Image: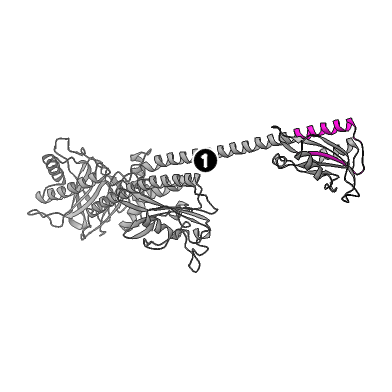
Amino acid sequence: MNRFARLATRLLAVPLGLVWLEPAGDAAGAVPECWPADSEPDPAVPACCRLVAQDARPRFLSHVGDDTADGAAAFAFGGVPLVGGSGEILGVLAVVDRAPRAWSEDDVRDLSDLAAACSAQMRMRTRSETVRQAREAAEGEATRVHELLNRSELLLRASEDLADTSGLDDVRRRVGDLVGGDLEPAGIDLVLVRQGMLHHVTGHPADGDGAFGAPAGRLTEPFSLGSGWPVARAVREHRTIVVHGPSAAGTAPAAPGEPATPATPAFDGLELATAVCLPLRGTLGTLGALVLGWDAPYEVGVEERAVLTTLAGYTAQAVERALHLDERVTVARQLQRAMLTELPEVPGLELSALYRPAARDDMVGGDWYDAYPLPAAPGATAGALALTVGDITGHDMRAAALMGQVRSMLRQADHDHPGEGPEQALCALERACRRLNLPASGTAVHAHLTPAADGHWRLRWSNAGHPAPLVVTADGTVETLVRHDVLLHHALRPGPRTCDSRTLPPGSVLLLYTDGLVEERGGDIEDNVDLLARHLAAAPPGVALAPLLRSLLDAVGPRDARDDAVLFAVRVAAS
């Protein structure tokens, strides 16, 4: 606007130019200006007001003011209205001469042309401002739509990713992955109700999951469901609680005179500005809460609250399923471990067994080992011992239950057939399974150890499709007991089984194991058996069996074990 005032003074040869604005002109984005900039526009302002208030047409007055009447100095005024796009008056482009003058037609035309250009400039500003506001509104709407799409994608991923979780650790990890990329919280805590207490489900330090709950490696104790923590209130009251301000991180009191109260104990010491406590509603009640915290103020509007509530719903479903599965697996593992034998103490022998469950928490298997004294047959040497390592097909509670039945039936078969070989016990087991319609299938090595002369022991064994046992003598020589018969299967008609025997001299070690030790996806079992034999031969003489079995498992066992593994070793005492 200063430019038009300056041009007006030059074209009309006057000392003062002025752009005076009505409120409509302010809305057009114009700025009232004078030229020269330090001039005093007061003499012209009343004339501009009268021009707009009367007929809003150009006015050129040669004499304004009266020295004798009101003390105002005389001056000449010329003004042309500035008109908007709808004919509204935006203001006045005016010129002032300090002395009376007659305005020529050229003066009127030049000022009118400048006023038209000034009006056009102001209308263009109005349109530009309208376009800018429309563009900003469109960009804002596009951003909102983009955020809504992102939230929709987040919920879609949540419904998919949390639908097949296998345990609480898996739920914790997947929730962290989901919210970490979209919502970008600085802290996450998952707490569950157990016996009136709230327990944190936190990551292990090795996970590098510091954003989940407390900093990685920092342990947080359970806390009471009846405590004043906002997360406890969210669980008790079954509602979402949003904590704003420093109290979200515990850096300021929640109320005057009260100590600081973070949203959850896991956030104590974290500098968070906003936290949201979301109850996890299960089918039988509230399971716990999911807590998200941000280190900057986070707006939780209606749409964001709906997204967070839906995310909490998916999390609750996954947690409920994981708790149910964990309970089943815990029962199965307790059952399985209860059936693993407490090894007997046998003079002249050292016995040790190692059981390693599968890496996946939802898998329980039918692997077992067993050792028990055999009944002495008339005229036979006392002190004989039965040894078994077996693997019932399957990785679930059914396999574990079948294993328990087979184990007990095999023990009974040995005690019902005193003096007979291990092959007879396996045949009796198969006949009993067939008569009882017990759908047991799998593999097993069943052996009898009997003391012989000079500290030797006689080994008789029958192999039903199981990995071959290994024998290493005191001088480091390894022998693989390769002969075997068909596996155990309820659909196969029981037939005769073979029995082999050999003598175990003092200092020799017999190793029985299941295929979980040597079977690995993409690997060759025979290669792993050869590796097992080499490590067994390289073991220092006289090393205790328990650390020997652990070293064999570490050296040969697969890192991502998908099957249980059993190692069972017997050493004949050195003479």
Give the farthest residue toward the front.
69
Residue 32 in sight in this render: yes
Q: Nearer the viewer, residue 433 or 265?
A: 265
**Which amino acid, mark 1?**
Glu
Position of 474 relative to 466 (above/below): below
Give the farthest residue toward the left.
378
Q: Nearer the viewer, residue 517 or 13?
A: 13
Q: Nearer the viewer, residue 90 or 438?
A: 90
Magenta stretch containing residue 96, yes or no? yes
Q: Nearer the viewer, residue 63 or 517?
A: 63
Instruction: Name the residue tied to disc 1.
Output: 147
Mark 1 residue element: helix
Magenta stretch containing residue 388, yes or no? no
Residue 509 in sight in this render: no
Pinpoint residue 144: horizontal percent, then vertical percent: 54, 40
The way the protein has been coloured in the rendering is one colour
Quadrant location, the C terminus: bottom left
Pinpoint residue 187: horizontal percent, then vertical percent: 48, 53
Pinpoint residue 511: horizontal percent, then vertical percent: 28, 50
Q: Magenta span covers which residues?
A: 91-120
Give the farthest residue toward the bottom.
257
Residue 98: quarter of image: top right
Q: Is residue 1 left or right of residue 471?
A: right
Dot 1: within a 10 Å radius of its alpha carbon, few (fewer than 14), some, or many (20 or more) residues?
some
Quadrant location, the N terminus: top right
Position of 128 relative to 410 (above/below): above
Q: Is residue 207 left or right of residue 168?
A: right
Pinpoint residue 282: horizontal percent, then vertical percent: 33, 49
